[in-house]
Image (cartoon, rainbow, N blue to C red):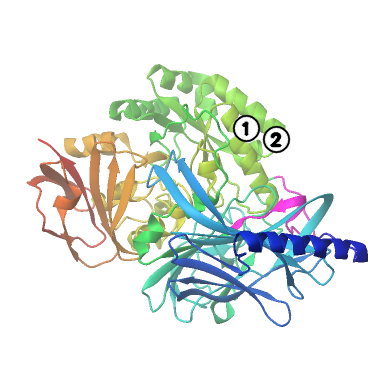
């Protein structure tokens, strides 16, 4: 992007300086001129290469096994081409980088990872420079493009030719990226079981690509990778994968120009990424797992996201919330809102969510004031267009905070355009200034943002339980999807699935009641919005009520016990003194399992197990047993179980 004149004197000076530096480095230590970086323990490696035409490629290996075959890298800009004719201009020393932080919401609270990183500068035919940053760690590798020199002129990227070459016949779990519509793209489609290179079929809406994160089972189905993004901000659009994956090569695609149905976005001839310089682009993340469970617990996406921008996070508290919309979608009366506030109080929930229509009820009867009087912190719904403009957003946040509101659920973003990515960063920042929590709905998938903005509690971008109202295929596919989402969507960030929806809706549920309750513990969300009526909660056995009251919403430690996406998931979860094992069956068949409960129940004398009751769709059964090393159980079709370790 930056033009460099070929001036003889500068060239001679530059050569002399490089020569002196070369002598100095040689006298001290060997200079690493390789085009690769390898993780500290030596397992994961990303390697760049240039062919005879100066085209840039990369590959990813783990212990010499190929996970991503040779794939293209490069950018085509409005004023420069970095897709061919490239040569190496500079290679930085390899550096060791430590990421140590805590997450307000996650599978594991404390994160500490070491990485090796390297930056390689490439020069095109015109002398313009582009840097590719490489990083490798225990959980995978990543790369990004960067232009560091300051220049106020706005530049465009017309094409990013980044590809991900997946071996032929590798199995994948991919979600279609829906074309722009009244409520799309919103990342609310099924994850489809496909083979590498398969076309998009049976999507919920017309689609023009595949979403990230994208999960693949590679190396003859022995290992796993997840392709994702991290660090996307207002300088780049959200990206997805092109649909025409010829030969299993999935290429980056930008947001479409017509993704503007729900927001006051201008009509444009194109919506290419644009920025002045310096310009740091998002990380392209490749999480690597020997087994599927390694993918589920990975924090590589947050490791690469910017550190927290909120200095004092003491006011940010994850929690549970009652939510009246699912059981009363057309009831906007203060009486119903207050009943769900009372439900939160009775279960010890921290929050209650007032969904669409709350303003009138509050004006007439003061539902916010009532919640505060009960010691419950109210969360309120809002439409995205009211929070898109910076000044209007700041004013609205201040109004809500002054009213006693604790958080906002902002709905119907339905776009990955660059302007929307910038607006979301503004939402997080402006909400934080008013000590407000954020829940995004009808939105893009998170990209590590909950590390950068810890007040970002959760987001939809998931086909959740509201689909029992709208999607006829959901009942049959829900159990399978629930065993896929923890390895895909939830790795990107907290997911507002709105679990525990027992009342039958338009399309009757087939999952058992305990399967539905288990999803509150297999998925991670900074605020769990429990779906269903007061009557259903009141009807629960006391042990199930107590489980819900005690249930954490974030975890100190998570271990994958059994993990087969699309089939079965069993997790060990711990928070402070609480310890659980939770499992779900994604199939229509009984699944026998064996667990060493003595391993997971150290320090406890017994375990309580909650399973299917006499009516599996609506009832629960509770039993207590002494802990045994060899424990066998058969999970019911579309069923589940929750084990709580206890001392009694």
Q: Are marks 2 and 1 in contact (CB under 8 Å)?
A: yes
Boundaries of the magenta span = 264-283
Front-most of residues 42 and 15: 15
Instruction: From the image, give the main secondary structure of the stretch colored magenta.
Output: loop
Q: Measured from the top left, where is residue 119 in percent x and y?
A: 64, 60
Seen at 58% across and 53% down, the residue is 183
Q: Which residue position holds label 1?
A: 430
Tell me which residue sits at (41%, 48%) in the image: 497
Total number of numbered labels?
Answer: 2
Residue positioned 43% across, 25% down in the render: 377
Categorize mark 1 by other alpha carbons within 10 Å: few (<14), some (14-19), many (20+).
some
* Figure quadrant of residue 543: top left
Viewer-proximal residue, 257 or 426? 426
| Residue count near mark 2 (Cα–Cα under 10 Å), binned few <14, some 14–19, many ≥20 | some
Q: Quadrant of residue 81?
A: bottom right
Residue 160 included in the magenta stretch of the image: no
Q: Secondary structure at mark 1?
A: helix
Residue highlighted by disc 2: 390
From mark 2 to mark 1, how far is it between C-alphas? 9 Å
Outermost front residue? 27
Give the side of residue 414 with respect to residue 352, left or right: right
Residue 615 in sight here? no
Q: Position of residue 112 (x, y in %)?
A: 43, 47
For the C terminus, give its image quadrant. Answer: top left
Q: Is residue 558 above or below residue 481?
A: above
Dot 2 lies on which element? helix
Callout in the foreground (2, 1): 1
Q: Quadrant of the N terminus?
A: bottom right
Residue in the foreground of this view, choosing between 85 and 320: 85
Question: Residue 261, image x and y in percent?
Answer: 66, 51
């Amino acid at each position: 992007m930056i033009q460099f004149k070929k001036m003889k004197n500068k060239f001679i000076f530059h050569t002399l300086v490089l020569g002196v530096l070369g002598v100095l480095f040689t006298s001290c230590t060997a200079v690493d001129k390789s085009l690769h970086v390898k993780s500290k323990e030596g397992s994961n490696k990303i390697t760049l290469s240039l062919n005879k035409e100066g085209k840039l490629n990369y590959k990813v290996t783990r212990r010499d096994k190929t996970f991503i075959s040779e794939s293209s890298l490069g950018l085509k800009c409005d004023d420069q081409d970095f897709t061919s004719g490239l040569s190496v201009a500079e290679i930085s020393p390899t550096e060791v980088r430590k990421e140590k932080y805590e997450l307000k919401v996650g599978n594991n609270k404390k994160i500490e990872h070491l990485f090796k990183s390297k930056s390689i500068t490439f020069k095109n035919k015109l002398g313009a420079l582009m840097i590719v940053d490489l990083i490798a760690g225990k959980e995978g590798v990543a790369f990004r493009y960067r232009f560091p020199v300051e220049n106020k002129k706005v530049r465009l990227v017309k094409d990013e030719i980044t590809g991900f070459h997946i071996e032929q016949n590798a199995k994948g779990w991919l979600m279609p990226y829906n074309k722009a519509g009244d409520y799309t793209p919103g990342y609310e489609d099924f994850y489809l079981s496909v083979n590498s290179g398969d076309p998009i079929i049976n999507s919920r809406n017309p689609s023009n690509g595949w979403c990230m994160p994208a999960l693949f089972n590679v190396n003859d189905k022995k290992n796993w990778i997840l392709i994702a993004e991290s660090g996307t901000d207002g300088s780049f659009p959200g990206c997805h994968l092109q649909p025409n994956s010829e030969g299993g090569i999935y290429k980056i695609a930008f947001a479409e120009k017509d993704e503007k149905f729900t927001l006051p976005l201008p009509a444009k001839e194109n919506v290419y990424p644009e920025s002045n310089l310096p310009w740091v682009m998002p990380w392209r993340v490749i999480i690597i797992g020997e087994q599927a469970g390694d993918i589920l617990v990975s924090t590589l996406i947050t490791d690469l996201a910017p550190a927290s921008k909120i200095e004092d996070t003491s006011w940010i508290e994850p929690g549970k919330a009652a939510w009246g919309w699912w059981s009363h979608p057309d009831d906007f009366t203060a009486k119903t809102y207050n009943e769900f506030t009372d439900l939160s109080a009775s279960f010890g929930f921290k929050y209650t969510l007032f969904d669409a229509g709350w303003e009138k009820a509050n004006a007439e009867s003061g539902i916010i004031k009532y919640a505060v009087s009960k010691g419950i912190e109210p969360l309120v719904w809002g439409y995205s267009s009211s929070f898109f403009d910076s000044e209007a957003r700041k004013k609205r946040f201040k109004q809500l905070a002054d009213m006693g509101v604790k958080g906002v659920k902002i709905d119907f973003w339905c776009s990955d355009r660059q302007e929307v990515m910038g607006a979301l960063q503004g939402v997080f920042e402006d909400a934080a200034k008013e000590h407000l929590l954020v829940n995004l709905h009808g939105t893009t998938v998170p990209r590590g943002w909950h590390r950068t903005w810890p007040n970002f509690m959760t987001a939809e971008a998931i086909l959740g339980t509201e689909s029992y109202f709208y999607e006829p295929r959901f009942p049959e596919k829900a159990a399978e999807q629930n065993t896929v989402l923890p390895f895909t969507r939830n790795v990107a960030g907290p997911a507002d699935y709105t679990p525990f929806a027992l009342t039958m809706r338009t399309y009757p549920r087939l999952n058992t009641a305990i399967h539905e309750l288990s999803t509150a513990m297999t998925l991670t969300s900074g605020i769990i919005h429990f779906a269903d009526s007061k009557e259903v909660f009141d009807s629960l056995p006391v042990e199930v009520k107590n489980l819900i009251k005690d249930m954490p919403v974030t975890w100190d430690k998570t271990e994958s016990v059994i993990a087969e996406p699309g089939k079965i998931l069993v997790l060990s979860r711990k928070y402070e003194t609480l310890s659980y094992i939770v499992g779900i069956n994604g199939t229509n068949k009984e699944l026998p399992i064996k667990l060493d409960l003595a391993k997971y129940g150290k320090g406890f004398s017994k375990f309580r197990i909650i399973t299917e009751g006499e009516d599996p769709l609506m009832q629960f059964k509770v039993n207590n047993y002494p802990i045994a090393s060899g424990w066998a159980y058969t999970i019911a079709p579309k069923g589940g179980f929750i084990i709580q370790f206890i001392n009694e």
